[in-house]
Amino acid sequence: MSDTTATLPSTLTLRCTPEIVQGQKVYVRIFPRSVRDEWEKLKGAGDDEQKSQQHPDEKKNLPYSTALTYLKFKTGGYVHLDRYLNFLVSLEKIDDETLRHVFRCVVGYSKGLSTDQAVLLDVPPVAEAIANTPEQEFEMTRFLKPVSGRQPKCPDWMYVAVPWVISKKLAQEKFTIYDLVPITKKVADKEKDGSPKLDANGEQVYKNRTIGWKANPNKREVTYLPDSRGGLIAWDHPFGRKYNLRDDATEVNEATKAQYAMSRLSVVMKTEPNVVHPVIFLDAHVTRVHSNMIYAKSTHIYQGSDGLPILHTELVRNGNVRAVNQRALELLARDEMDISVLQALQTRVTEERGLLEKAAERGEFPSFITPDAGIIRPLMPQNDNFAVGTGPGTLHLRLLAEHVSKVLGEKATWVDFTVEPMTFEPRPTDKQKMAPQERASRIEAGELLHTIGFPSPEEITASVKAQGFEHLRIVCLWYRWNTRLRMINALSLAFPDGPPIGDPEPGEEVFLAPGISVVFRQAERFLSHGDDINRTVEFKSLEDDFADSESQVMVGAWCETEIPALKKKDGEKRNAFLLRKERYDGKFQVRRFLAKKGFVCQFTKGMKPGSFGNPATEISPPKPGKDHAAYMALLDLYRSLGIIDQRLARAIAKDRKGREAGKLVYCGIHARRQAKTADGKHTKRIIVATALFPPEEEGDDAWTMRAWTPQIGAWVPYREAIAAFHASDYALHVDGKGETDKARWAEAAAHVEDALSSLVRDELEPGMDYVVMVDGHACRRMWTGLHNENQSYQEEDIADPRTWLPGYGKGKNAPRKKPSAVIRMNIADDEVPQYVPVPRESDPETEKEAITFASAKLHRADVDFGNPFWVLFNIPRNYQAKGGDLGKTITRWDADPGKGGEEGERETNELKTPWWAITATEIYPVGVAEGVDRTMLARATARLCHQTIAWSDRSRYPVPLHAAKQLDLDHPQYRRSAPPEEQGDGATDE
């Protein structure tokens, strides 16, 4: 193995010490309040062309985009202008006249002037004030000197500039890549029944068994170039079907063959709790190149000169398409900058618009073929149908750690993590442990060895009774026979010991187990899309299947749906179209209709959307054990009904302090800022709280969950909260008095105080304690005690009117009892450590495999002072299912494009397959009461991530927080106006 193996860290969390940036200078202008106020006025203005844009945020972005794009091209790229004009930072000096020139033109553009007119404009006061703000020169080391026992305090511009310096250093040496080859040993082969396997002559047959791995001595080098965001790109080493060659590879069309991607390394500076240095989070990514610019959101541009970074430039909307900011390009061309890049940009956009117009004239879907790798490479938004899969692979992370250690040498010091000594309770979704011979024989006998994780009927019944009901009825509403069959197959798998479901008549109640039944109804009209359907009339024929809310029957609806094929009307604005789509979508309407009647529901798609203009196709029932969409819908229905099986109790009891952990009430607080209303005046802030209650008597009954929202104003069973929350629109937070964003977040925090006050007063038994779980990233504006920089201080040390931590409010409406602890969670990819797999060469004589390719264990950080934090590393289930572990022994450069053919001849397309993207959940208990064990809290939180509510595999959030967030995500209004970061796991390939 490499000589650096012994020095590799457990995570890619590098301490940003002064030695790393020794001798580096940075140039900063810090703008006063008066200048920032004038800038905000300028952002609100706009010429006639700007005012025709579809979205107000895009109009506001144009002055900023013009200034930043111009400065990036003018100065080489290492420059950042704060969006609110707090500062301007660069690695090279920027003269006053350059700033006076560009901001004069920006003001001119806002007045509707052309470039030729804007350059002749008298210098406006705001441009003069920006140019006259003194440029200060700083040594970076000045801000990185650690203070013992204190969190680092760096100015905001340091978090921008330091990654530039680190990436430049890492780009100075070539990146070494290799693959891992197995260490094998001959062992006696066996038959399926365990007996020795013999050849035709009666001799023992041997096979090679992998007992370890080692680096292939055939090493190569790859060159990375720094980019203007503070990362690195393997610009000259793309991967795709044109580059990962195989003579007998499957033939594909020209568009697929042209697709390619690049390796990108990210370098991000953040802080971690109780670590005296800022930290650098390093990670590897696959950046896929889009076939066109007009639908991309950003692009990379090669400047063609040593020492200059790859420019990352945001593209601005122009009508229905995107392009590089034309104002900035006009101004740069007038200033006699290198026009070759500008011409290439303009030519490409013009050609693509021509193709778009021709396709529109013919009524066709526009088709683009990715050009050969050139100086302009637009980045692709998220798309699964691509020739190169996402995820760099775990080996690439190890190679990155080796590269950093090689380049920085002794200057590279890392935040250390050690594995927390604990074991997780086995889950229903874990593969059954059995000898290979037994597994083979059971499969041969036709036994289905699934790992879906359906709860047992007895535990479902116990949870239903704990909520005050005697019976659970699942109402299946469908309109395609294939969907009906999929529902039957899923229920048969979930209740294997029950009577056969067969082919039930409409409305016939089929008992799956004692206290659990199902009814099937064809309800095409009720479920159909359209805002003109009288669903009240359509529901009358179904009413008998839905028990009255006063009865002892708990009802959950499992419904079929599909994505509506709705197109924009000519001239229809985006927001108007999305609002019309919401009103048209049957899924939204049915969810709202049933919620108003007090019922919860989950949906399963019966049609698979077509891609690239192709029509949608009906989903046929997959093989038994493979219809994961149907299984997840059924499990999500259990979760919506508040059905909690015994896995949570078993998981918490597993800990050596399980008795203490099992007596706590676990409260999850979900907070999110919703998009503004159509008039742009009001911003909605969504607050949802849940509480997971242990049974009153140890070992008796099931855990239960209740929820709270401002609209309800009281704690009610989770099922009731979902119905009440989904029955109405999001609350408009227009009754608050705060005028600033900070004040409105403080008002949102006051809602949480109301919830916790009600929890303590109305729900907790005497002597009962509770803990609060929050997403520290999402709630960072609400409570100052969550901030890393405040971990060295107490509440009374900080002069901030906001509440210190949830449950710490003051006054008559404050909770009478503070929480025993607040557990701060963080899952933001650029704010949590990335795990480094460290495979070590095994000794063939020991016959022991000593490789750790990925760890799903809880790790404790070795902090410099104060209390530790923990990180739970996760291997996503979908990556495991799709062969994502391919990246543990090779990099994308060695990925095989595979081969088609008859079954038995096919070979895996490693290039297209998604590889592991190891995720992490940071767990940090703060505000811990005296006598409460922090380690116990961290372990209990990890167990509540590992064991979920009747769902498959591990969640990145613990149960209460996951349930609170899901209540919001299922809201009928969520999909239309949620911010991009809430739309899914990763808005782009990066």
Image: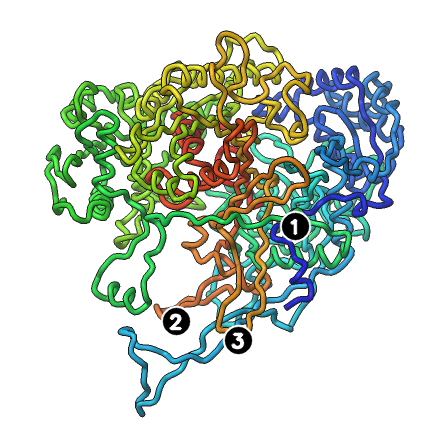
**Which residue is at the front of the view, 198 or 220?**
198
Is residue 346 something that shows in the picture?
A: no
Which corner quadrant of the image does residue 926 belong to? top right
Q: Which residue is mark 1?
A: 265
Q: Nearer the viewer, mark 1 or mark 2?
A: 1
For numbered disc 2, what is the local secondary structure?
loop
Q: Which residue is mark 2?
A: 905
Numbered circle sitting on residue 844: 3
Type of residue at label 3? Pro
**Residue 247 x/y as whole percent:** 52, 72
**Which residue is at the front of the view, 495 or 74?**
495
Residue at the location (82% across, 23% down)?
104
User: Would you call the spot at circle 3 few (<14 residues within 10 Å), some (14-19), or many (20 or more)?
Assistant: some
Q: Nearer the viewer, mark 3 or mark 2?
A: 3
Residue at the location (61% across, 25% down)?
785
Residue at the location (12% across, 35% down)?
509
- Quick check: marks 3 and 2 in contact, CB under 8 Å? no
Q: Can you name the residue that lies furthest to the bottom here?
A: 201
The total number of labels drawn is: 3
